[in-house]
Amino acid sequence: MKPERSGSALGLCYIQADAGSTGVWVRADTKEKEMNTRRIIWMAVLALSMVVTACAKKAPKTSDVNANPVATPAPATDVNPQARPANVDTTEVNPLNDPDLARLNDYLLKQGLLGDVFFDFDRADLRDDARERLSKNADWLRSHPEFEVTLEGHCDERGTNEYNLALGARRSGSARDYITSLGVANARIRSISYGEERPQCTSSTESCWGMNRRAHFVVTGRTNLG
Amino acid sequence: MMHSRSIRAAGAVLIAAASWVAQAEQQQPGNPTPPSGAPVSPPASAPQGGGAATGTTITIVMPDGSTRAQIVLAVPPLANLAALQGTAGTAARTVDQTLRRDLDKSGIFRLQEAEELAVLSLTGDLGHDADQYRSLGAEMLLQNEIKQDGDRLVIEGRLIDLASRQPIVGKRYRGTFDLARRIAHTFADEIILYLTGKRGVALTSIAFSSDRDGEKEIYLMDYDGYDQRRITGHRSISMSPAWSPTGDVLSYVSYFGGDGPAIYLADILSGRKSPVITSGSLNSSPTFSRDGRRIAFARLIGANIEIFICRRDGSELRQLTSSPGIDTNPAWSPNGNEIAFTSSRSGSVQIYVVDAEGTNLRRVTFEGDYNDGAAWSPDGTRIAFASRTQQNRFDLSLVDLVTLATQRLTSGGGSNESPAFSPDGRRIAFSSTRAGGVQIFVMDARLGSEAEQLTFEGANRAPDWSGYLP
C-alpha cells in the first residue's frame, strides 16, 4: 500500500512534466502562457509536496513495522492473529485523503456521493429528481470545502455532434447554476462539455441513452482548505 | 516537368462551349443505362462501390436550359500494357484505372469499356473505327498510350469527337511511377474542364474525424477515398475539421490542452499545429471565411452558446450572435458575406443565415424540429443540412435560399449527417450509419442517390471537402 501511494505521487510528477511540455507548446498570447506557467509551477509544487508528504509519512512508520513483509518475511513462528504487537499504531486511512484522484472518485462513486444528474431527451433543464440529486451533491460539497470539482455535460448519441457539444454545455451549466444557488462557491466548479464524445454506455437503446444524458461530477483538485 | 499540348478542333465547339449546371434532376424513366464494367478490379484496399453515376441515367442541363444525356465515351483497353514490366506496368495500370474512375465519378460520361466494346471489329484506323464506336452509340473516344522512359512514365492521351473524328483534347504527361494517380487525376480534371468549363475535383481532398487508431483524430483522404492518413496525434478528442479555402491549413477542435475544447490549426505540408482560441469555454465548430483570414466558431458565454469571429491567429475576437439558447455550427458562405448557423432561439433547432456583420438575420429551415449541419453549395444558392426525421435518424436535405423550397436528398438507410459539397457542387460527402458503424459516403448532389462508401475502418465523421487545391 505505501510504496503504491508514493508511486502514484511520482506519477503525478510525470503528468505535470507532460503538461509542462504542452504549456510550452501553447503560446497563443503571453497572458495565457503566463497563466499556464503559473499553473504548472503551482501543480509542480503540489506534486512535489505530495511526494514529500508521502515520504515524510512513510519514514517514521518503517521504524515501527516492516513496510515490505514479502521481501523480508517474518520469522516462521506461529502468530496469534488476535495478538497485536504493542508497538504498532493503527491509523484509519480516510479515502477522502487519497492523493490519487481517480481512486478518490471511484470511492465517491461506490458510496453514491456526488452522483450523476440525468436529463430528458434534447433538454438541459432540471427535472425534479435532478434537483433532489443536486441538493445532496451541494450538501456534500458544502461540507467538503477542500474539493474542487469538474462538472461534465454529456449527451446521448442522437443529435449531431456539434449541437450535442452545445447541449452538453447547457446541461453542465444548469447543474452548476443550481448548486451555486445552494451555496457552493462558483470558483470550485469547472464546467466542460463532452457532447456525445464520451458516453458511459455505448449501445443504441433507450436505457443507454438515458444513462448518457447527464451532468457528471468529478473531483479534479483540492482547494487551499484541504 | 510535364509537357502538355492541347488540340482543339472546330468539330468540338458544340460540346466545348457547354457548361453544365448542377441542379436538381429527375431520373429519366424507360432509358436504362447498362452497367459500366470495370476491366480490372481495384486493389483490395480501394474503396468499393460504383461511381456516383453508375447505373443511373442523368440528364445534364445546359446553360440555355436545354438538356442532354451523359456523353457516351468509349474507353478501350490500353493497347501496349503488356510491353510494360514491373513497377512501370503497375504504374501504367494505375493511371488507366484511376483515369476511368475519375471520368466515371464526374457523372458527365457514360463509359463504354472492354466488355461492351468487345463486339466491335476495330482495325486501328480511326476512319474505320469511328463508325464502329458510333454504331454502339459512343460520341467520344478516349485513346491513351503509356510508355516507359527510364524511371518515368510518358502518358499521351487524346479525347476524340467521333462525329468529326477530330481530337478535342490532347495531353502528354511525364512523371515518375509514384505520380501515376496524380497524373491520371490531372488529365481527368483537364478533360472535364474542357468539356464543362469547370475544373474536375479529382485533385481535391476530404478531411474527417476518425477513431480508427483509438482516440478521435483528424484524417485526410483523396476525393476518391484513397490515401487515408492521420494528421493529428493528440490522443484526446479531436474533431470538426474545416478547410481553409486555400487548402494550406485545417482548423479543428481538440480537447488535448486539458481545458475543454479549443480551436487549433494544422498546417497540411509541415504538419505543424498552432492554437487559435484556447481560452474561454466550449470553443467549437470552426469555419473559415472565404478569404481564409478569419474563423467563425461557437463558444460558451454566460449560459449561452454564441457565434464568434476572430482572425486566424485568434486576435480581434468579436461576438456575432446574441440570443438565449444555443447558436452553433457556423458555416461561412462562398461569397464571404454571410454565415449560416444552427440556433435553438425559436424553440426548435433550425438553420439561420446572418450577414458577417451581424445584420439581416433570417431563418431558412422550417420543416421538422431539428435541423443542423449547414453546408453551402459552392455557388451560394443552396444549403445542404441534416434534418432529424426520427428520434435517432437524420436525413439530408437541400434548401434553396431564394424560394426556401426544400428537397430531400436521402431517405432511409441509417442516419445521414454532416453534408459537405465538393468544390464543383456536383457531389456531397456525408457521414452515414447505413452500412453499420459510422462511415463517410459520397453521393450525387442532384440525385441524392448512388452513394459510394469511402471509409471502412473505425467510426468516421464530419467530412469537409477541400476547395480546389493548388
Image (cartoon, rainbow, N blue to C red):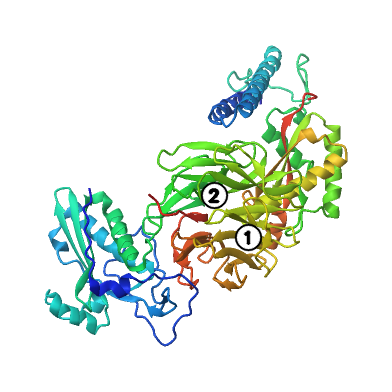
Q: Is residue B379 above or below residue B148?
A: below
* Mark found first going from the N terminus, 2 or 1: 2
Q: Is residue B64 above or below residue B416?
A: below
What residue would you read off at disc 1? Answer: B372
Q: Is A179 displayed left or right of B230 in the figure?
A: right
Q: Is residue A29 above or below residue B8?
A: above
In percent of the image, x 73 and y 50: which residue is there? B322
In percent of the image, x 76 and y 38: which residue is there? A108
Q: Secondary structure at mark 1?
A: strand
Q: What label does residue B289 carry, if any?
A: 2
Q: Could you give the CA–CA distance between mark 2 and mark 1, rounded to whole angstroms?
A: 19 Å
In percent of the image, x 53 and y 56: which residue is there? B335
Closer to us: B161 or B432: B161
Closer to us: B416 or A152: B416
Q: Is B439 displayed left or right of B205 in the figure?
A: right
In percent of the image, x 71 and y 60: which residue is there? A207
- The residue type indicated by label 2 comes to Ser
Q: Position of residue B185 (x, y in %)?
A: 32, 58
Q: Position of residue B157 (x, y in %)?
A: 21, 63
Q: What label does residue A98 carry, if any?
A: none
Tell me the subunit letter for badge 1: B
Closer to us: B185 or B290: B290
Q: Secondary structure at mark 2?
A: loop
